[in-house]
Each structure stands twice: as structure tokens, then as C-alpha cells.
Image (cartoon, rainbow, N blue to C red):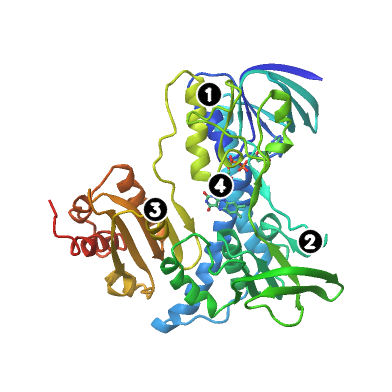
Amino acid sequence: MEKITTHTVVLGSGPGGYSAAFRAADLGLQVTLVEKFSEIGGVCLNVGCIPSKALLHVAKVKDEAAQVSEHGISFGEPTIDIDKVRAWKDSVITKLTSGLKAMSKQRKVNLVQGVGEFTGSNTLLVKGPEGETEITFENAIIAAGSRPIDLPFLPKDDRIINSTGALELKDVPEKMLVIGGGIIGLEMAQVYNALGSNISVVELQNQIFPGCDKDLVQPLMKRIKKQYDIMLETKVVACEAKEDGLWVTFEGKKAPAEPQRYDKILQSVGRLPNGKLIGAEKAGVEVDDRGFIASDRQQRTNVPHIYAIGDITSNPMLAHKAVPEGRLAAEVISGEKNYFEASVIPSVAYTDPEVAWVGVSEIQAKEQGLNYGKGAFPWAASGRALSMGREEGFTKVLFDKDTHRLIGCGITGSHAGDLIGQASLAIEMGCTAEDISLTIQPHPTLTETFMMATEVFEGTVTDLF
Ligand code: FAD
């Protein structure tokens, strides 16, 4: 067995892990990065954010090409070469993962491939394709991420897939059931629908994206209702795998009376943190029942020299939360007195239209009894949205009525995911309605809608400074 010592070991090379490793190396620490797969980049680059967005891009181009016929340009019926679509998606992943490998090399981060498990408070055993390595460390950063939840009552069958299987894009099923109307499920539904699948979505709650303000979801719902069969307040209670397909029984408001046949089922009902799979208890690190490893505002676990970041430590499970947590853990290890201080973390569904929100939602503002005021701007009045033929969007801003500070924002429409960044910045900077409405935005752009929604709020208040 090979034995190595390192100042800091990082377990897992997703966005949290590689950001931690790179930051630690930049700060002059000697770093070892452990990853079970041959490629680094974790879920996000290999089977998450990036491949899904590459496929969504293809889906969007196809849908837009069809839509532009209303504006005077018509194309023929599209032909889909699934192998080429897959190759495009894979090429995007390869560009990014090989870039990461080069960056690791440049920083002299020691990469060890294999499955890592703690064997003590300062030791990690890695079982890799080349044999075993024992790593003795002074500090560890746990960045081992999460995995999709499997519904226990579904049979074991190749035709029942999760997001990883969906992104492999092996084929395009004729009829596909998506279990779960959350972000990942609806992004994948959009991809497969564009490629030709007949999609049904089943969701337990009374809306898609449970927890998101209903008005934000409406424009998306209106569009996809025409494309898929959406069963809200309904659940799958049984599934039988037969030769001719997967026969599913439903219960609830929209449940069909008879079992329905599907060629494929995508289960997309959330993710579980990997805390119970890494021998954390042998290092004395506490793991809760679900598999989360709690960390403080410096990312420290209950064992002071062991840190936890990203999906494994807390919700929301998002790459843009894992990255700053990873960088922070490295900085704390190198002696900097920094804390996780983000006041808001945006959420984005890259569906069409996109749905994005940040800060306090209207549901939360009401629940918490906040003294808030609202401004909403329908994109039907935006010159840019109209010239794109996408006037279904809207921008909503929530302000604290006493301070006039922005506390929340929701945007639905094309590029909402890019637009929401302005609101994140404004909340972090403590911007007031006046700061936003007096900021000159370029015309004609969708960013103007942020300013215009704010002006609508200003029209509702009389005590402007
Ligand atoms: P991960 O990316 O999960 O990486 C953990 C790594 O640790 C993995 O590479 C794993 O192989 C490795 N590992 C685990 N255990 C061991 C072990 N014992 N030994 C060695 N290695 C181990 N987030 C966004 O912000 N935007 C998006 O658009 C978005 N889209 C998504 C789409 C899909 C389909 C999915 C599934 C997720 C998406 N996410 C998105 C979520 C995002 O991928 C995760 O939040 C992010 O990857 C978490 O980063 P992480 O560093 O915590 O862990």
C-alpha cells in the first residue's frame, strides 16, 4: 500500500472540492484531491449542471426555430441525430474537465483516484484502480456531494432512470413519465420533449417547483401545459415492469383511473447527501440521519480540523453555494479569519421560460409577517421581450417598506437566470429602491424590467427619500 502525507486532503472533486483544492494551493498549502472517478468536476460538470444545460441549449434552439415561423422564417421539419447531440454534450464536458485537470497540474494539486474512506481522525484510505493509498493529513475538507434518491417501491429495471441516466441520452423513449415536478425533473422533461418524447409529469404538491411563488411559475406552467400532461397533487403508488412497458398506478387529484404504460420513467424526487458513505464516524465526524454533515460558518465540522462543504453539508444543493464554501474552508485552514456571509443564494430553473428567484419570496414574506412592498413589471410592456416574441415573462421585486431595501426578486422569462444576478448583487449591497431605479440600464434590454418593476414599487410608497 502506498502511504502519503499531506497538509490538506480534499475528498471529492465537484465544484466545492476543486474550488477548495485550488484555493488552498493558491494560498501555498500542499493539497491532495481524492476523486473516485477518472474525471474531476463532480456531479455538476459530469452529470449535472453542465450536461443538462448543453442539452437544454439544443432543445431551446429547436423550439425557437419552430416558433420563428410566426415571425416569417420557416425551417423544414428538424431531424435529430441523437448520437451527435450526445457527442456535443460530451464535448462540452470534456472541455471543462480537461481544463480543470490542467489547472490542478499547474497548481501542483496531487490527484489520487479512488474511493476514499476515513480510517481515523487524521487518516483516509483510498481504494483506487491502481491499488490502495493511505493518506495522513493535518486538515480534511469533505466535499463528497450527494446522489439521486431512488423511490423504494419502484422495481429494478433499466427503463427506470435518474438524472444521471437521463443525461446519458441512450435513446429517446416514445412515452416518458417524470416523477417530481422540481427543477431537475422539468429541465429533463424539456430536453426529452424537444427530442420527441411524449412527456407526463407527476407531482405530489399543488404546483411545480414547490416553494416557489405561484405567480412566477404561471408563465412556465401555461407553456408546458400545452406540451405535457401534468398531474399535480397526484402520486405514483405502484409500478409493474412488463415486457411491453412500465405500468404505473397513480393516486390523487389527477390520477388516471387505470394504470398507464410508459417506455421510460425518470425519477427526480430529490438528492441525498453522501455523509454516511465515507467512514465519517471513524474520524469522529457527526452525520445526521439523512447523511448531512453539519458545519459552522467557517465550514468546520464538530472535529475542528475537518471541514464540510457543498451538497454534503446543507441545502440548497447548488454548485454556486458549494464553490464559495470550498474557497472559504481553504482560507480558514490557511489562517484567514473569514466566515460564510452570503445573505442570499439564487435559484434558477433553466426551463423555457426560465424561472429565477433570490432572497425572500412572497410566500415567505407573508409567512414571516414582513412589512414589504411589491413592484411587478409584465414583459408584455418590454420592447426587448416583444421583439423576441417572448412577452410572457415578468419581473417582481420585493422591498422592505421601512428601509426601502430590496429583500427579494423573482423573474420568469428568457434569460431570467442571467438577469437574477443583478438582484443578488443589489441585495448583497443593501441597495434601496432608489439605487435601483436611478441606475441607468441599457435600452432595450430585459434588465430594464428590474428597474421598471422597482419604479412600480416606488409608485406605491409616499415616503421616498
Ligand atoms: P458533487 O458535485 O456532488 O461532487 C462530489 C464528488 O465527490 C463527486 O465527484 C463524487 O464522485 C466524489 N465522491 C463522493 N464520495 C467519494 C468518495 N468516497 N471517494 C472519492 N470521491 C468521492 N446546481 C447549480 O448550481 N446549477 C445547476 O444548473 C444545476 N443543475 C443540476 C442538474 C442536475 C441534473 C443535477 C443532478 C444537479 C444540478 N445541480 C445544479 C446541483 C449541483 O450539481 C450540485 O449542487 C453540485 O455539484 C454540488 O457540488 P459538490 O462539490 O458539493 O459535490
**Element carrying mark 2:** loop
Label 2 or label 1, whichever lies nearer to me, is 2
Amino acid at pointer 3: Gln
Marked residue nearer the N-terminal end (2 or 1): 1
Residue drawn 20% across and 56% down? 437
Identified by mark 4, the residue type is Met
Q: Earlier in the sequence, mark 4 or mark 1?
A: 1
The one nearer the camera, 307 or 295, is 295
Q: Position of residue 209 (x, y in %)?
A: 52, 62
Question: Contact (CB < 8 A) between labels 3 and 1?
Answer: no
Task: Tell me how far mark 2 sits from mark 1, CA to CA.
Answer: 46 Å
Task: Give how far across and how far down residue 433 sits, in percent.
Answer: 22, 53
Q: Which mark is residue 368?
A: 3
Graded by Cα atoms within 10 Å as few (under 14), some (14 to 19) or many (20 or more), the crowding at tag 3 reads: few
Which residue carries the number 4 mark? 317
Which residue is under mark 2?
153
- Give the residue pinned by disc 1: 25
Q: CA distance from mark 4 to mark 2?
A: 25 Å
